[in-house]
Amino acid sequence: MAITQTNDSDQPKRPYILIVEDSPTTLAVISSHLSEYVDIISASNGEQAWELIQQDHDIKLVLTDIVMPGLSGHQLLVKIRKSDDPRIANLPVFMMTTGVDVTDKHLAFLNGVNDFLTKPIDPIELQARINVHHNLANTILELEASRNELKLQATTDPLTKLYNRRVFFEEGDKAMFTMLRYKTDLSLILLDIDYFKKVNDIYGHHAGDVVLVNVSRLLGSLVRHVDIVARIGGEEFCILLPGTNRLGAAVLAERIRKSIEATTTSVDEHKIQISISSGLVTASSENCDKFEDLVKIADKRLYLAKNSGRNRICVSDDGKSDYS
């Protein structure tokens, strides 16, 4: 493979393209046409090109011959379009051929090629087409980034980056449906930072935000990847535990309580220690078939935990923390 000299950092970003060509002579001619306008990386066959595409995230466009040893240009195109990685699947791909048979063109377009070039290649036409598709690809990437950002804003809490209340209840409804249909376990932990208002009053709201972020990170480190953690209020968090029985939920709730009690948050010169109270509920132990009713039970038990002295978990309506 060969790579041209890259631009200085203060120069405008140029297209960075992969040329897949097994003929050194043809590669040299194409590179001479393009090197003034783009940065080039090359591969001599489809297998090598596929490896580069997966490894090099800076590749913005692929210019490939059709007939090559091993993986052909058509096969490379199919692999690109079927990739699970949106960056790869959306790469602009040009195909080159010397033939006049339209069969290759029809197959290439069916497989998702962006443009087609016939050898010998006109350098002005090549440059113009690359510029058009490079700009279009950049626009698509920007739109995709904007879409992802909007989705992130709609589903996550801006401070902690946990799921927000809306997503939590949506996921809870789904989990409740699964639990009722397949008779599986489902538990819920509702937890609240004790005396959080005092943290804000004594140390300031910035310190309070740092505490919230640290609690969020700790919660994320203690749960499984299938669990759902959300911030549903100022200092209130929920953990949805699919496939978890009452004992498993209580053990986790107590582990979280001890971990937070043992953690110190440093803000400026201050060392802040907090505790939490938790109410938990397991759907199979309750007479309810709506997720919102499950949350109400957990909320009632959270209130009992706070009323019983805080820094504790509550697993039943009588305020008990014994989960054996």
Image (spheres, rainbow, N blue to C red):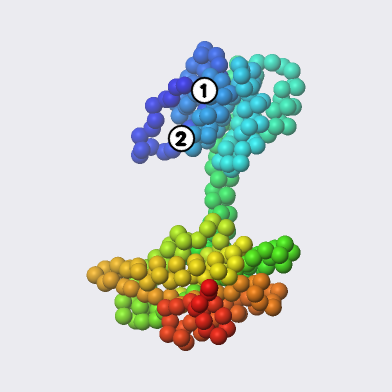
Residue type at mark 2: give it.
Arg
Q: Residue 224 location, x and y as percent?
A: 53, 58
Q: Which mark is residue 14?
A: 2
Disc 1 element: strand
Up the image or down, 296 lies above or below 25; here it is below
Question: Mark 2 near mark 1, Cβ–Cβ under 8 Å?
Answer: no
Q: Which residue is mark 1?
A: 43
Q: Earlier in the sequence, mark 2 or mark 1?
A: 2
In front here: 272 or 9?
A: 272
- Residue at image coords 72%, 16%: 100
Give the number of the mark in front: 2 or 1.
1
Position of 158 with respect to 261 (left or right) is right
- Residue at image coords 57%, 24%: 47
- Residue at image coords 64%, 22%: 72
Up the image or down, 287 lies above or below 91; here it is below
Marks 2/1: CA–CA distance: 20 Å
**Residue 218 position by quadrant:** bottom left
- Residue at image coords 49%, 34%: 55
**Residue 164 position by quadrant:** bottom right
In front here: 290 or 26?
A: 290
- Can residue 190 be seen in this snapshot? no
Q: Residue 157 location, x and y as percent?
A: 50, 66
- Seen as rendered, the residue at the extreme left is 269
In front here: 269 or 226?
A: 226
Local crowd size for mark 1, using a 10 Å CA cut-off: few (<14), some (14–19), many (≥20): many
Residue type at mark 1: give it.
Ala
